[in-house]
């Protein structure tokens, strides 16, 4: 019984994708692979689900940045189309990230909307350069506690930024963007709490909690 050359030489190494294959826009790959009725239904449902979250979140980021809510909607719509056309995977869905509220708000406060646009363009160029240099693989060297601590810190900052709207507090001036000054300003305005706003907030939180218990897998089910 002879041994084939494949067994003799061992497993063949996987072929590395070319530059064109690696950065081929998603629109081209979807057209090449095809999109049936089942794929279209799944994509439409996934897009609708993300849109339900994206629209209010994009307006919240805009309001937190000191601009009008419509600018958040424009950014979400334009960004969504760009991600859909130029993304690298047909399973990729783009949307705003709540963690960026802190960064966008501070940048807008210190450098204005023009500074936010410039910072966004610079961040995009950095990400393109990082992709070309394949430096994303080094993320594995970042310790897990650092990642968890960063995420938890962002969650605390976002929660603090929502306390004024959650309780209807009225401040004499603009709400500070820094964490400790923000808490001090909110504590000074505790006497202006609006009971109606608090009731609406508590009812909304209760509805969300009940839905998570009643239909924990929605909308996946």
Image (cartoon, helix red, strand yellow):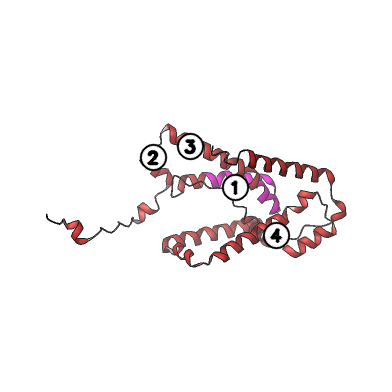
Q: Which residue is mark 3?
A: 42
Q: Disc 4 on helix, strand or loop?
A: helix
Q: Which of the two discs, 3 and 4, sits closer to the camera? A: 3
Q: Position of residue 216 (x, y in %)?
A: 60, 41
Disc 1 crowd rating (10 Å Cα; few below 14, some 14-19, many 20+) is some
Q: Is 65 inside the magenta-drawn segment?
A: yes
| The residue positioned farthest toward the front in the image shown | 1
Q: Position of residue 89 (x, y in %)?
A: 43, 48
Q: Earlier in the sequence, mark 3 or mark 4?
A: 3
Q: Which residue is mark 4?
A: 109
Q: Earlier in the sequence, mark 4 or mark 2?
A: 2
Q: Which of the two discs, 3 and 1, sits closer to the camera? A: 3
Residue visible at 43% across and 32% down in the picture: 37
Q: Which residues are magenta?
A: 59-80
Pick the quarter of the image with the N terminus.
bottom left
Q: Main secondary structure of the magenta part?
A: helix
């Amino acid at each position: 019984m002879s041994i084939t050359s494949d067994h003799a030489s061992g497993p063949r190494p996987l072929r590395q994708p070319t530059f064109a294959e690696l950065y081929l826009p998603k629109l081209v790959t979807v057209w090449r692979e095809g999109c049936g009725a089942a794929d279209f239904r799944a994509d439409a449902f996934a897009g609708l689900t993300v849109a339900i979250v994206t629209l209010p979140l994009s307006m919240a980021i805009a309001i937190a940045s000191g601009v009008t809510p419509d600018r958040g909607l424009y950014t979400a719509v334009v960004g969504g189309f760009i991600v859909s056309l130029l993304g690298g995977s047909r399973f990729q869905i783009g949307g705003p990230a709540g963690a960026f509220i802190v960064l966008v708000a501070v940048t807008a406060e210190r450098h204005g909307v023009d500074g936010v646009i410039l910072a966004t363009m610079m961040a995009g160029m950095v990400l393109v350069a990082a992709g070309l240099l394949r430096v994303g693989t080094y993320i594995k060297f970042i310790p897990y506690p650092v990642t968890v601590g960063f995420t938890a810190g962002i969650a605390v900052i976002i929660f603090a930024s929502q306390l004024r709207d959650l309780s209807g507090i009225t401040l004499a001036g603009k709400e500070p963007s820094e964490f400790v000054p923000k808490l001090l300003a909110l504590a000074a305005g505790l006497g202006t709490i609006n009971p109606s706003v608090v009731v609406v907030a508590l009812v909304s939180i209760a509805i969300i909690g009940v839905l998570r218990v009643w239909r924990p897998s929605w909308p996946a089910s």
